[in-house]
Amino acid sequence: MKRIGIVFYSRSGTGRAVAERLAAMTHWPVNEIRDTEPRVGLLGDLRSIVDSLLKRRPPYRYDGPALDTFDHVILIAPVWLRSLAAPMRAFLADRVRGIGTYSVICVMSGYGGFRAVDDIATLTGAKPRSILLLKQYDVLAGESDPSLCRFKAQILTAAGPGDWADPVLPAVD
Ligand SMILES: Cc1cc2nc3c(=O)[nH]c(=O)nc-3n(C[C@H](O)[C@H](O)[C@H](O)COP(=O)(O)O)c2cc1C
């Protein structure tokens, strides 16, 4: 597996910290999905909740390469209301065509990570090769490096194209 890329969305910095840490360990290129309108403060909270409840696909900005230019994509996103954060959902709904194999890192306060991974599998029509669920507290305390190291090792081991018949590699936590 040669061309591996990281694509992340982060509203408040946890997913960004994970993306930057993983990139520092691996030198894989990092690309960001951004809100066109920043989700700051209470209004930003409310908009995020409504987007999640109504399963809206909010506008976003992405200046990175198409997903089909990677052999393997690492998707990093937060959990919102026990599901995938709306901007990543919108991005995947638009851009998923041509995605090769992929893996997922979800950041969260504590629950709903597997539901968010299910959302991604539904949008992509394929299972992730590897899953890592990280709690915000651990990321911000700088305690996610060992998990990220194991995740990186799994990605490098899981070479080749995947399909629904492949087992999902055990989740790292
Ligand atoms: C609207 C909203 C809903 C959330 N729902 C959940 C949830 O269901 N479960 C959870 O563990 N964390 C939930 N969180 C917390 C975020 O997943 C967590 O703070 C995450 O680390 C944020 O990532 P970010 O800093 O990259 O944006 C929610 C946050 C927001 C803003």
Image (cartoon, grey):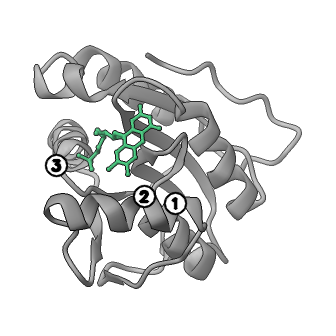
Are the residues flagged by discs 2 and 3 in contact, CB closer than 8 Å?
no
Q: Residue at x 78, y 59 (%)?
A: 125
Q: Is residue 120 left or right of residue 5?
A: right
Q: Is residue 151 left or right of residue 116?
A: left
Label 2, ligand 1: CB separation under 8 Å: yes
**Residue 77: x, y in percent?**
40, 50
Q: Disc number at residue 52?
A: 1
Tell me what residue is drawn at x 81 percent, y 35 percent.
Answer: 166
Q: Where is residue 14 in the image (x, y as percent from the top left)?
A: 21, 42
Element type at mark 3: loop
Can residue 128 be seen here? The reply is no
Residue 141 makes an appearance in the image:
yes
Residue under numbered circle 3: 13
Which residue has dot 2 on it? Answer: 49
What kind of residue is marked 1? Ser
> Quadrant for ligand 1?
top left
Q: Are marks 1 and 3 in contact (CB under 8 Å)?
A: no
Picture residue at 38% right of the left edge, 80% below the top: 65
Q: Contact (CB < 8 A) between labels 1 and 2? A: yes
Mark 3, ligand 1, within 8 Å: the answer is yes
Identify the element where label 2 is drawn: helix
Q: In this view, does 169 lie to the left or right of 166?
A: left
